[in-house]
Image (spheres, grey):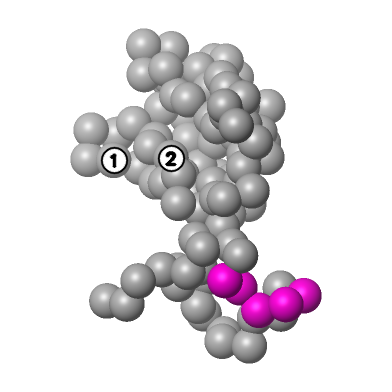
Amino acid sequence: MSELKKWFELPIGCTNIEPGSSLNNITAGWRVFTPVIDEKKCTKCYLCWAFCPENAIKIADDGFPKTDYRYCKGCGICSNECPAKAITMIRQEV
């Protein structure tokens, strides 16, 4: 497998001329907030997974949602949709 591209290596204007290539482009470099899932509060309702616009949340073998931080852009939708308030958005240090 080839090395994944960073956000600054994407084509100018973010035009992606390679259909189906989103896995080849790591887009998390512009994330300001990072979602952190508290498994003690998580009820495994999977609303975070259902609403994630980037498909950055996967369901692990233990049934808990896990964030793939290579693709998470930190939009906070998962946190907003979580009825158990199990996802906290943490501001990244610069």
Residue 67 position, x and y percent, is 43, 40
- Which secondary structure, mark 1? loop
**Hey, which residue is sitting farthest top in the picture?**
40
Q: Nearer the viewer, residue 33 or 81?
A: 33
- In the image: residue 78, left or right of residue 45: right
- Which secondary structure, mark 2? strand
Does residue 68 appear in the picture of this structure?
yes
Question: Does the stretch in magenta take in 1?
Answer: no
- In the image: residue 50, left or right of residue 67: right
Which quadrant of the structure image shows residue 15?
bottom right
**Hey, which residue is sitting farthest left in the picture?**
61
Residue drawn at x 35%, y 71% is 3
Disc number placed over residue 60 in the picture, else none = 1
Q: Nearer the viewer, residue 76 or 82?
A: 76
Which residue type does callout 2 highlight?
A: Thr
Query: Pointer 1: residues within 10 angstroms few (<14), some, or many (20+)?
Result: few
Disc 1 versus disc 2: nearer the observer: 2
Say if mark 1 contacts mark 2, CB within 8 Å. no
Magenta-colored segment: predominant secondary structure: helix
Residue drawn at x 62%, y 42% is 31
Residue located beneath label 2 in the image: 67
**Hey, which residue is sitting farthest front in the picture?**
94
User: Up-down: is 66 above or below 2?
Assistant: above
Where does the C terminus fall, quadrant-wise?
A: top right
Which quadrant of the structure image shows residue 37?
top left
User: Up-down: is 83 above or below 1?
Assistant: above
Query: Pointer 2: residues within 10 angstroms few (<14), some, or many (20+)?
Result: many
Cα–Cα span, label 1 and label 2: 10 Å
- In the image: residue 23, left or right of residue 93: left
Q: Which residues are magenta?
A: 9-13
Residue drawn at x 50%, y 17% is 86
Q: Earlier in the sequence, mark 1 or mark 2?
A: 1
